[in-house]
Image: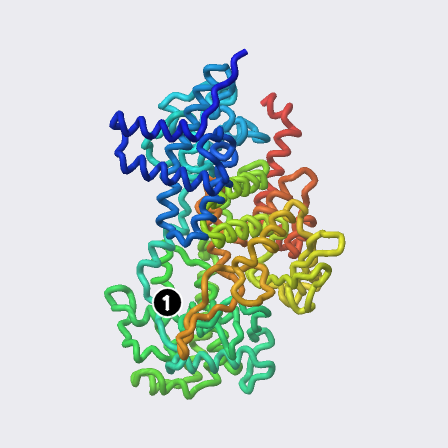
Amino acid sequence: MHAAPRLTYKMLREQQQRHVVTGLIKRQTAANRLTALNLFLRANQLHEDDVVASEFRTTYPQAIQKLVDNLRSEDRTDRSISNIRSALTCFKEAVTEFDTQLALSEDDIPPFTKMVKSVMTDHPVKRVAKQCGIPSDMLYGWLNGKWPRISSVKYIRRLESFFALERDSLAALAGFKGNERDEPRVGEAHSIAYREALSARNKSRYWLVTSENSPLGLQWTELQKYKTVAVPELERTSKGRWTFAPLNAVTKTEKTWWAFLGGREIPSARMAWARTASFLGWLSLPKTEGGRSVLEEQLQTLAWFVVPGLLDDYLQWMKARAGGKHTGTTQEFLAMIRWLCRPENGYLYQCPYLKTTLPDEYQAQDWHNMCAKQFKHAGQLTQAYQHEIAPGRDPFEPLEQLMQALEPMEMMADMVERMRRDRPIGKCPKTEAVWARDIFVVKLLLSNPMRLRNLACLKWFGIKGSKGSSDDGVLYQRDDDSWWIHIPKRLLKNRASTASIRDYHAPVHPTVWRDLERYLFKHRPVLLREPTELVLLTKSLGPKSETTGDTDRSHRPYTDIGRIIFDRTRRYLWKSDGIGPHAFRHIVATSILKADGGDIKTAAMVLNDKETTVEKHYSGLRSADGSERMAVLLDKSFARM
C-alpha cells in the first residue's frame, strides 16, 4: 500500500516560483507572497521542510491570529497586516486544491463535503434548505458527496450567509471564485410600511429647535418644576405629577436638555416636549406648506397652546402627514391641551402673565376665557376623533417571520450560531470584545427579557455572592456558581401599575453562563477605561468638555445597545429588517405561548408584568393558535365537509 503524498511548505514556495517562470504572476507579487509565508512560519514556529498541517486547514484562524499578534508586537500598521494576510490567500487555496485532488484520487471525502457536513451538524436539512432557498435535493446531494456545478454558486453563497461563514469559504472549497453578486446575509427582509413612511417624513424637519436659556426654555423649566414638585404653589390634579426616572439612561446635552431638571431625567417630559416642538414648529411653516408663517422669535412661548383656531388645522395637517389617519399622537396632543388649559387647576390657566408673550392681536382677549374655550374645544375634538384613531405602527410587524414560525426561539438560536461563526479573527482585541459582548447580550435578553433602561444600567460588583447595594439592578453569581439578576421594584417601568408587580429576581439560563463569563472575565477588561460597575461597556469615548476640551473617558449606561441589537438582528436574524431589545420580550412571550403547556401566567412571570397586559397584547396569537388546535381536534368532521 503506497503512502499518501505529503505537501510541504517548500513545495508551496516552489509552486510560486514556477508561476513566475510561466508568467502567471509577476516576480514582485511572488516575492510579497513568500515574505508573508516566511512571517507566517516564524509566528507559528514552523520550517519550510515541515508538512503542511492543520494550521492551513481547520486551525487556520488561530494560526492567523498568532501571526497578527506577532506583527502587532513589531508595531506594524493595520494596512501592512491586512496586506500580509491577503498575500497568504494563495497558499490557503493551494492547500485546498491539493486536499481536494488527493481526496478524489483516493475516494475520500473532499474538503467541500466535509465542510458542509460540519456546518449542518444538528441542523434539519429541510428546514435549512427552506430558509436558505436551496433545493433540498441539492443540499442532500452535497452532504452525500455530490460535487456542485458552477450554476450552484449562488446557492453555496446562501449557505455561507445562513451560517455566517466567511465570504467564499465554501465556494473556494468547491473550486469557485465567481464574481456573482452578493446575496443577502441571511435572507431578504420584507419591507416594513411604518419604517418607510417614517423615513420619508423625517426628510421634512419642522420641529422647533431652541436652547435651554431661551424664553421658551425658561418657561419649560418652570413647567417641569410645577409637574415634579411634591406640593406645587399652583393647583395641580392628583394624577398630574411627573416622576423622575429611577435611572438616568440618557446623558443631558444641548439637544436633550428638555428631558432633564437638576440633572435628573423626566421620562414624561419627552412626550410633552415632542408635542410642544411639533406644534410650534408647524406654526413656523409657510402657509403654502400648511403652517401659519409665524416668525421664530414669536414662537418662544407656551402661550400658543391657548390661542383659538389652531387645533383643527394642526391636527388635520398631522393627519395628512401620517398618511391620512389620526394616530396616538392626536390623543396625546389633545390630552396635553386639556391639562394645560383646564379651568382652575390647569397650568396655563394659572399663568395669565404669559398672555404678554403673545403677538399684539391676542392681548385684548381675556386669558381665562381663552383657556376655558380651548379646554372645551379639545374635549370635543377628543370625542369626535376617538373612533378614527388608528395605530401609528404595528409593533409585531418587524417580527412577522418569527411570529409565523412554530418555534421562534429556534430562529434566535440560528442567529446566535451565525454570530459565533462571524468571530473577528485577526482584528484588534476591542473588536473581538465587542463581538463577545453582543453575543452575551442577545442570549441574556432571550433568557431574561428586560427593558432597555434596566439592561443598560445593570451592574456587576465582581465578588461572588455579592448583590451590592439593594438600590441597584445587579447581575451577580451565587456560591453555587449560578448567575442571577436582581432589579428592585422601584427601578421597573411598571412599578406603580399594580401591587402584584414585585422586585425582578430571576436566574440567568445556564446556557448563557459560558458567554457571560467569557465576556466578564476576558473581554470586558479590554473595554474598561475607568473603574465602573456597569456590566455593558462600549469602546466609544464620551463627549469633550466645553471648558477644558478634555475627552470624557468615564462609562455611562450603554443605551446605544438598542441600536447595536437592531444592527445585529438586521445582519444575523433570518429575513429581519432589524429589531430592538423590547422585541425580545415579544419573542420570549410568543415562544412560551406557542409551546405545549405554555400559558399566560408563565409568560407574565417571565416578563415580570401583569397577566392582563400579556393577555391583551397576545390575544390575537392565542386566537390563531386556538383555531389551529381546533382544526386538529375536529379534523374528521372537516374532512367530511
Q: Is residue 445 visible?
A: yes
Residue drawn 29% across the image and 37% down it: 29
Measuring from the top left, give residue 174's x and y in whole percent.
Answer: 42, 25
**What is the residue that sits farthest to the right in this orientation?**
480
Q: Is residue 411 left or right of residue 363?
A: right
Q: Nearer the viewer, residue 26 or 372?
A: 26
**Way the structure is coloured:** rainbow
Q: At label 1, which amino acid type do we have?
A: Asp
Q: Is residue 421 left or right of residue 218?
A: right
Residue drawn 37% across the image and 81% down it: 214
Q: Which residue is mark 1?
A: 312
Q: From the viewer's perspective, is residue 361 above or below residue 270?
A: below
Q: From the viewer's perspective, is residue 158 above or below residue 425?
A: above
Q: Quadrant of residue 351?
A: bottom left
Q: Nearer the viewer, residue 543 or 173?
A: 173
Secondary structure type for disc 1:
helix
Label 1 crowding class (10 Å Cα cut-off): few <14, some 14-19, many 20+? few
Q: Is residue 397 visible?
A: no
> How many labels were placed on the picture?
1
Quadrant holding the C terminus: top right
